[in-house]
Image (spheres, rainbow, N blue to C red):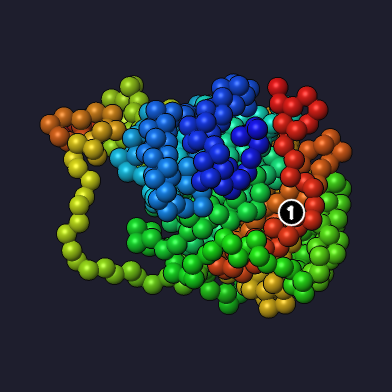
Amino acid sequence: MQIGSDLVNYLEALARIELTDTQREKCKSDLQDILSYIDTLNELDTSGVEPLSHSFPVTNVFHEDCVQESKDRDGLLLNAPFKKDGCFKVPKTVE
Amino acid sequence: MDICKMTALELAGKIHSKEIMIKDALDAVYKNIDKFDAEYNCYISTCREPAYRRAVEIQARIDAGEIISALAGVPVSVKDNICTKDIETTCASLMLKNFKPIYSASVIDKMEAADMILIGKLNMDEFAMGSTSETSYFGEISNPWDKGRVPGGSSGGAAASVSAQEAFLSLGSDTGGSIRQPCSFCGVTGLKPTYGSVSRYGLIAYASSLDQIGPIAKDVADCAALFEIISGKDAKDGTSMDFPKFEYPNVTNGSIKGKKIGIPADYLGRGISCDVKDAILNAKRELENLGAIVEEFAMPIVKYAIPAYYIIACAEACSNLSRYDGIKYGYSSPLAENLKDTYIKSRSEGLGMEVKRRIMLGNFVLSSGYYDSYYKKALMAKKLIQQSFFDAFTKYDILLGPVAPTTALKKGESLSDPLKMYLGDIYTVMINIAGLPAVSVPCGFDKDNLPIGMQLIGKPFDETTILQAAYVFQKATDFLKSPADLQGGLS
């Protein structure tokens, strides 16, 4: 797998991250090294193997539909960088 | 009487018999922190005022003769990715600098219910991503055995603080070796519990299918006592499991006579340092002397562990860390002008390079066109890796191996070469992929007098058997040293 600049730019866009030019070059070569190593996984024969997501069998967990105390609004807003009138404040989203 | 030299259980015994007041234990440990931590940087923050307040409450109950837990009154330190109500929880990142959770992790509630006292939050690799504790926004940690070396990671502060006698015991988290490897590098004991045995509620997520909280301590008995307190099913964590209650006295009453121990031969192959290999083979002989039957067996799948691990861990990380948007909590860029800018600039400025790299790698393996050949392939490898362990456990009660291929690395050696750092995780990541428990125990020293650790790997939810073996091994050997005991002591 060859990592080109286009791919790095695409990954930055997906990740909502912007690298500086120096970081981008370093990241490109690091990802190249890492993915070349990761490609050894292709040698492993996995035909007929079911992918395993959970280490141990887990089933859906149900509980009674009862009222429980939830976190209070002021508490939830405590760490918000910007807030207004009991809400999170964000930049204008519609022109 | 040097309080800080005691194990947690020794201290608890003296607190319960009122030979030591809790306040004196706090004074002693904070004194060591003040004396040594400028050098080692194990702590991101301490919480002295609430700690002393709690001490008064608990002391009053002990004085009144109330029934108390095995570790009541003992000060405990916690890795800074575990949420503590109203106490800063930073994940060693600019992104969460000043973040004060409005709730505590379940493990914190359990330790409080057991009358333990939180004394501070421990430094680590940023978002637990790293094996050297060099990626912290709050600066690197030094290994108490050699200040020019790393303490390992990502729970570097949790291991180094116990080693430097700046903590009696601590909680770390282990996603791919983050408890065991720093324990190996710092000469202390740590348990990575079975996936699902300790609640992850309130642990800031890195890779949710692999993350697990566990104890780090001076010896096996302390680890076992703390594991008893923090383990058990929790309704707040859907992946926590029901299993028979772990009871730490069983650990100190066990024997390994007749137990079958297997060493994966592929754990002693290419890449391992001679000193580490020798220490493991000496441990093998010691375990044989103690009555165990030890043999090597082939486990060729070892070579696929790192690729599978980094695909799975990074995929989950990119999803988990998408919550850092500069809006709900955490760092928000002052330079952002619109919503998309808020996301991009806050993440670009607020996260470090190793975290960005893993997020991007995760996006890659999950992106359309690559999902099947990377992510799905890794999940199939996960199945085969787990199956290899289950096959081994039809023949053996316990598996034995090194924790890391080397002893503590010099600072800066792997920071510039991430692949090199990732390869150091070869013996630990498989255990997380398979969901198994493993305990890291000191088993020797290299030619530079740096500690070497071994890990004993167990069947799911059978922490008792591996801790029993580790306990018997510690009783019979003399590797539980502190750098404070060396000539000249800590500087």
Badge 1 amino acid:
Gln
Percent x, y of residue A95:
16, 32
Decide which of B440, A89 is in the foreground and name it: B440
Decide which of A5, B259 is in the foreground and name it: B259
Left or right: B362 in relation to B57: right
Left or right: B204 in relation to B15: left
Q: Residue at the spot x=49%, y=36% of the render?
A: B22
Percent x, y of residue B99:
36, 33
Q: Residue at the spot x=77%, y=71% of the render?
A: B257
Percent x, y of residue B410:
74, 31
Residue position marked by numbered label 1 in the rendering = B474
Q: Residue at the spot x=74%, y=68% of the render?
A: B256
Above or below residue B379? Residue B445 is: above
Q: Residue at the spot x=70%, y=45% of the render?
A: B184
Decide which of A11, A50 is in the foreground and name it: A50
Above or below residue B160? Residue B470 is: below
Left or right: B77 in relation to B166: left
